Amino acid sequence: MTEAIDPRADRLARITALVDLDSFSEVGSRARHRVTAFGMERKRPEGDGVVTGPARVHGRPVEVFAQDPTALGGSLGEVHAAKIAAGLDRAARARCPVVGLLDSGGARIQEGVAALDGYGSIFFRNVALSGRVPQISVVLGPCAGGAVYSPALTDIVIMQRDKAHMFVTGPRVVRAVTFEDVSLADLGGADIHAQTSGVAHMVADDAAHALDLTRRVLDYLPSSCEDLPPIGPAGAADEMPRVPKDHREPYDVRSVIAGVVDFGTFLELHEQFAPNVVVGFARIEGHAVGVVANQPLVLAGCLDIDASEKAARFVRMCDAFGVPLVTLVDVPGFLPGTGQEASGIIRKGAKLLYAFAEATVPRVTVILRKAFGGAYIVMNSKSLGADAVFSWPGAEIAVMGAEGAVDVIYRRELAEDAGRREELLTRYRAEAMDPSVPADRLSVDEVIEPGETRARVAATLRSLERSMRPGYRHDNLPQ
Ligand code: HXC
């Protein structure tokens, strides 16, 4: 005789695989809906399709919930919502992170407005907790409607490849309304959300990997904005690579990150979305930091709309949770063109500017090869309140690159004698772009050798330790 699989036991198994041994205490296991319409009195799964309760991860308290797709499709009715809302209230009181394991068809159709209001009560709490306690959404199956808006309000979204799908309206509704035939994967698969929409911060190979990533993220974040991030073991960094001298030659900025942070600690977020900027958590001398770096491998490291929004939300999240920022700059400017302008690069680029300017955590910037124009200012410049700005020798900092600048300021000379171009380029580089120019006026604090970078960044962060004042700073508004 085959033993029946208990789906609640399956959800419990997911929670117990996430949390410390024997640390989970379930709350509300007997709760059920009381709906009688649509013959619902015959479908009253115990727990109403969600397992909730407090637990611990690496010794620290967390609040967890896990939805059960085998109970009414994991759909959310009044009681299901009340259980999650109670969990969010417990997290607010305990000042601890919330982890949601999601797998839900969205608002329970049979419960009508009660289900919609149930979502409203969760969204309300997601927003109230934003910037106060870390909220992590782990999407392990198809999620629709309200089941995707709640993750969008949280700090980090992790999707399980092949299993997780996220959409506001599912393929059946899409077909009925627009006659478009679209697969789950094309509508809301992990790849779409990791590469194109930017909804997913990370993609996991399977459920175990998703839970492992969740624990790793939690390790970098404090329990709440009123605590400091946990300190890990200190380690050495990789050797600093030699980056190409020619400013147009690409290299992977992740090799420079590896030369700054403790070995093996860099945890990249949004790896495939807007890869022209790299963001992620890491450790320096055991202390959590958030790294923001231009990526010369993609679009020459230009900032565009997606990159600005991606970096802006990361900076705001780090600031909300007291994680110091390390910015590595190699940026030719904002991506020019009608597409970007018409889509609002002014409005959206301003988000990154705003995020850095308002951040009160320690902030260190290293200019690696170049920093031009608005992008120089935006990337955590001294004038935006950076605590320290270092520059590598030979880095060019100016209103614009030499080619563009020479065409503007020497227009007449070049019209008379185009052969002078090289001479004028050399003159502009020497007079306007040498790091001694910004160093003269303290826009750059020190010109340092690449090999000194980690030591200087670490020393700056150490010197600012007492500037860290835990407390509520601001929310982590979705960008
Ligand atoms: C009630 C639901 C349900 C729902 C699924 N079920 N979604 N019951 N309310 N929202 C039930 C199904 O009837 C079925 O019941 C069981 O769950 C499993 O569903 P399947 O469709 O067989 O599963 P699957 O093929 O895996 O597809 C999963 C799915 C699909 C892609 C999520 O169920 C789906 O498209 N559901 C509707 C999604 C949607 O459009 N939701 C939007 C809700 S509006 P039986 O009895 O047959 O096992 C919303 C508003 C919030 O959420 C507003 C936020 C701003």
Image (spheres, helix red, strand yellow):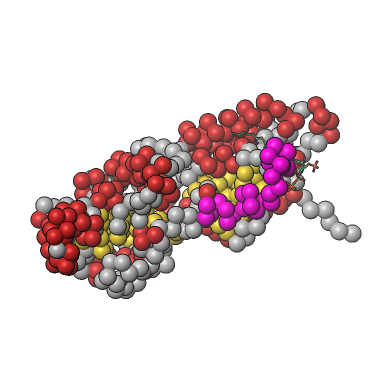
Residue depicted at 86% across the width and 58% down the height: 2
Q: Is residue 326 left or right of residue 3?
A: left
Residue depicted at 71% across the width and 42% down the height: 179
- The residue closer to the viewer here, 325 or 348, is 348
Residue depicted at 75% across the width and 40% down the height: 72
Q: Position of residue 429 (x, y in %)?
A: 16, 63
Can residue 383 be seen here? The reply is yes
Location of the N terminus (image quadrant): bottom right
- The residue closer to the viewer here, 69 or 472, is 69
Q: Is residue 409 above or below residue 108?
A: below
Location of the C terminus (image quadrant): top left
Prevailing secondary structure of the magenta residues: helix
- The residue closer to the viewer here, 113 or 396, is 396
Q: Quadrant of residue 421?
A: bottom left
Residue depicted at 41% across the width and 42% down the height: 342
Q: Is residue 362 left or right of residue 149?
A: left
Q: Is residue 177 magenta?
A: yes
Q: Which residues are magenta?
A: 171-196
Q: Is residue 436 left or right of residue 307?
A: left
Q: Position of residue 337 (x, y in %)?
A: 37, 49
- The residue closer to the viewer here, 175 or 314, is 175
Q: Position of residue 349 (x, y in %)?
A: 36, 44
Q: Is residue 320 above or below residue 233?
A: above
Q: Is residue 402 magenta?
A: no
